[in-house]
Amino acid sequence: MRLYEKNASELSEMLRAKQCSASELCNDVLDRINEVENEIGAFVTVDAEGAKENAARVDKAIADGEKLHPLAGIPIGIKDNISTKGMRTTCSSRMLENYVPPFDAFVADKVKSAGMTILGKMNMDEFAMGSSTETSYMHLTRNPHNTECVPGGSSGGSAAAVAAGEAVVTLGSDTGGSIRQPAALCGVVGMKPTYGSVSRYGLVAFASSLDQIGPMGRSVKDVAMVQSLICGHDPMDATSKNMEYPDYAAGLNENVQGLRIGIPKEYFGNGIDDSVKSAVMEAVKQYESNGAVIKEISLPSTEYAINTYYIIASAEASSNLARFDGVKYGYRAKDYTNLIDMYEKTRSEGFGDEVKRRIMLGTFVLSSGYFDAYYKKAKIVQKNISQEFSNAFEQCDIIATPTVPASAFKIGENIGDPIKMYYNDVCTVTVNIAGLPAISLPCGKDGKGMPMGLQLIGDKFTEQKLLNAAYAYEKMCGGFDTLAKITGEAK
Ligand code: GLN
């Protein structure tokens, strides 16, 4: 077995027991990237040199007997909308193709201080808008389970790399499902933490009231380890919650005796594949036979979730993306006659179609005459959705749903039909609308041999309970088989 195939928790112990060195581990993952990256396309930037230098530093620290963070020397990939000082951060957009941030995001700083080996930056949908990574200006990312299929999105590079063994763990961001949906389609574990538990400082903003950074990995423990590292109060983010954050990995517990699991009937209706419904219900049965109590619940506003999400997210995006004007940083059009012409050409040439669609939609729903009809209504529905979740959490500890209505679709299948593409987020957006934590776990494969996802949703700041429930399912399954055998005709 090669080193790249192992989980972060195992590798952490091996490094400490001197069964391998951080440099050996780093080189093995870099070799793996060389072997499969042409086929997968998970990275925008690979920093082999920086990774090797860090690994050498960790090896020296180990030899000197220094006390290291458990994640020191573990190779990680970072989504390309998270600012990394001195390393290109493109958001997979022409607008930021050559942008090198002069500062580190809060989470990048945490990753560096822990001594993790940063492999590079992961491909994504442009500015995190999309569900397939096809809106990337850079290149396609392919699903390692079938390279003719999308990896999901927008954190498609982060998910594909973990499934293909090109990174041990990665960071993604989730505004409406962008960690959980690609995790489900690539058969790995991905968590969207509670809004406010991970600082957004240095995350290029899409929809600030919904965005949250979170971890992806091949086991629940790995995700818990990374979450423990990146969470915490940050005065640089006004929405960051100041509280004691536990060590989630140390607190993992697989006991589900008496755990109340709610099953919302609205998440099992038309439009959800039968194979996905039965896989999720199979998982629920396993919980029940291990002592959990299953309750049917109702979240009636779910039917408005997609509309609500696309109004709020686009409204915020239209405002956040106003900063890309060709003046301060990023792309600037070559030929223009005056300032307005420069703005227009810069934004027309610098942004792709999906980003333009969101800016136009957002500007529309915020404009006078339409504000009350769309934006204001969406904010009212948001309150209803949050209230329904709060009521549900009075009767249950965890809510179980599918992550995505079906397994990965073919590249090109949905890109021409935005509404069909948006529907992929039908099970994930409510979590962001209500600011809750949720995790996607692999729950078997469908008839096409493609992974499906089980989503567990928790109440605000109950990550430990959520991770424990996830850990229990992983144990019931005898561990997750998260490493893909890379197959597919397309090269
Ligand atoms: N797919 C959703 C969108 O396109 C979610 C994106 C995200 O979570 N960043 O908006």
Image (spheres, rainbow, N blue to C red):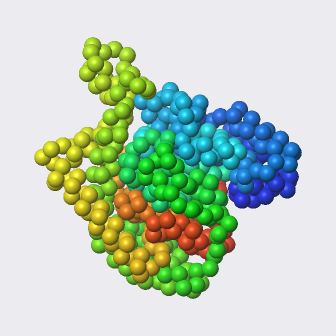
Report x, y in % for residue 375: 23, 52
Determine whether 180 is above or below 479 in the image. Answer: above
Residue 181 lies left or right of residue 30; in this view the side is left
Residue 66 vs residue 393: left or right? right
Q: Which of 109 and 471 is in front in this view?
A: 109
Quarter that holds the C terminus = top right
Q: Residue 482, image x and y in percent?
A: 63, 60
Give whichever of 258, 31 is nearer the camera.
258
- Count the numbered circles shown: 0
Horizontally, residue 17 falls left or right of residue 338, namely right
* Quarter of image, res 274: bottom left
Q: Residue at x 25, y 57 (%)?
A: 378
> Going by the image, does 30 lie left or right of 411?
right
In front: 158, or 82? 82
Q: Which residue is drawn at 57% across and 68% down?
A: 464
Q: Residue furthest left?
A: 369
Q: Which residue is drawn at 54% across and 41% down?
A: 105
Instruction: Work out whether residue 143 can be spotted.
Output: no
Can you give x and y, in whole percent of width and height, for residue 210 in the image? Answer: 39, 53
Task: Point out residue 357 in the picture as x, y percentages from the top left corner.
Answer: 29, 41
Looking at the rendered image, the quarter that the N terminus falls into is bottom right
Nearer-the-camera pick, 316 or 417: 316
> Is residue 62 depicted above or below 344 in this figure?
below
Q: Which residue corresponds to the image point at 83% horizontal and 41% vertical from the top-left?
A: 60
